[in-house]
């Protein structure tokens, strides 16, 4: 499975080997510290390198875009991540027009945010009928981000999944659209770990996307 390969990469390239699901790594979550004084044990937390925020957007034509966006939860540990993941709906269960976004704390999932304004995104298109693939890709990308397996993890701002009437889209947002080496390293690693076909991963600048319709946005890199 792709997820298993991503998790193997996490173990090799970061300190976050505990990010594997409980059924695959029973020691990674829910550990309890034993007390000799008879007091109740407490759960040991495994903090993430960065704190993340999960956002949800549900399309409502009567509202401004910013008013449709809501913060779901902050994620600061492996335990918080998996607890939230198994509580909320999978992307394949969302209605058309809905988005999930997960960004580093302090960054909003919008082009205008100062952390995003000079950056861009690696974009993946996913067939509407590939529901299992959609869920798997989204989870793998979240694991890759939170585990900081990219050599240029500081360039990562977050990720967005868009549920649409035609093809669904997943994108990984980076901070600096002119940092070619970092952009390509991130793109190549996404392609490798996610087993993407050639030319299915394209990088677009936010500045271009803001000026044009999605169908006409030029991709500056393709892997």
Image (cartoon, helix red, strand yellow):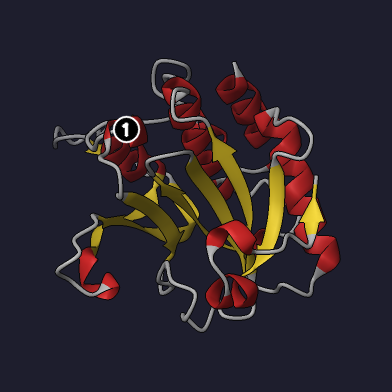
Residue 187 horizontal side relative to residue 136, left or right = right
Residue 64 horizontal side relative to residue 219, left or right = left
What's the residue at 47%, 23% (across, down)? 130
Residue 175 is drawn in which quadrant?
bottom right
Q: Is residue 30 visible?
A: no
Q: Could you say which is closer to the camera, residue 162 or residue 181?
A: 162
Quarter of the image for the C terminus: give it. Answer: top right
Q: Is residue 94 visible?
A: yes
Query: Eyeballing the image, is 102 above or below 8?
Result: below
What's the residue at 56%, 49% (across, down)? 145
Q: Could you say which is closer to the camera, residue 137 or residue 16?
A: 137
Query: Eyeballing the image, is 48 above or below 193?
Result: below
Query: Eyeballing the image, is 205 above or below 115?
Result: above
Query: Eyeballing the image, is 211 above or below 56?
Result: below
What's the residue at 74%, 30% (across, down)? 197
Query: In the rendering, at what x and y percent does residue 103 appear?
Result: 45, 61
Q: How many marks?
A: 1
What's the residue at 32%, 33% (across, down)? 90
Few, some or many residues within 10 Å of mark 1 (<14, 14–19, 20+): some
Residue 32 horizontal side relative to residue 180, left or right = left
Quarter of the image for the N terminus: give it. Answer: top right
Q: Could you say which is closer to the camera, residue 31 or residue 51?
A: 51
The kind of secondary structure element at disc 1 is: loop
| Residue that carries the numbered disc 1 in the rendered image | 90
Q: Could you say which is closer to the camera, residue 63 or residue 80?
A: 63
Residue 148 horizontal side relative to residue 161, left or right = right
Query: In the rendering, at what x and y percent does residue 125 appear?
Result: 57, 40
Query: In the rendering, at what x and y percent does residue 127 appear?
Result: 51, 30
Query: In the rendering, at what x and y percent does residue 148 appear?
Result: 62, 50
Name the residue at the bottom extreme.
114
């Amino acid at each position: 499975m792709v997820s298993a390969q991503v998790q193997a990469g996490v173990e090799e390239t970061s300190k976050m080997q505990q990010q594997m699901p409980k059924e695959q790594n029973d020691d990674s979550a829910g550990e309890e510290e034993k007390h000799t004084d008879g007091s109740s044990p407490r759960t040991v937390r495994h903090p993430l390198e960065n704190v993340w925020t999960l956002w949800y957007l549900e399309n409502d034509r009567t509202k401004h875009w910013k008013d449709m966006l809501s913060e779901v939860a902050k994620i600061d540990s492996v335990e918080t991540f998996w607890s939230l993941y198994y509580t909320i709906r999978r992307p394949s269960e969302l209605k058309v027009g809905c988005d999930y976004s997960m960004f580093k704390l302090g960054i909003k999932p919008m082009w205008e945010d100062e952390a995003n304004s000079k950056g861009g995104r690696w974009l993946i298109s996913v067939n509407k009928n590939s529901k299992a693939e959609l869920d798997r890709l989204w989870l793998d990308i979240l694991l890759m981000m939170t585990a900081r397996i990219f050599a240029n993890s500081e360039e990562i701002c977050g990720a967005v999944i868009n549920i649409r009437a035609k093809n669904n889209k997943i994108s990984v947002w980076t901070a600096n659209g002119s940092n070619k080496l970092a952009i390509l390293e991130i793109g190549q690693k996404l392609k490798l770990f996610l087993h993407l076909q050639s030319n299915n991963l394209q990088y677009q600048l936010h500045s271009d996307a803001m000026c044009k319709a999605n169908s006409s946005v030029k991709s500056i890199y393709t892997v």
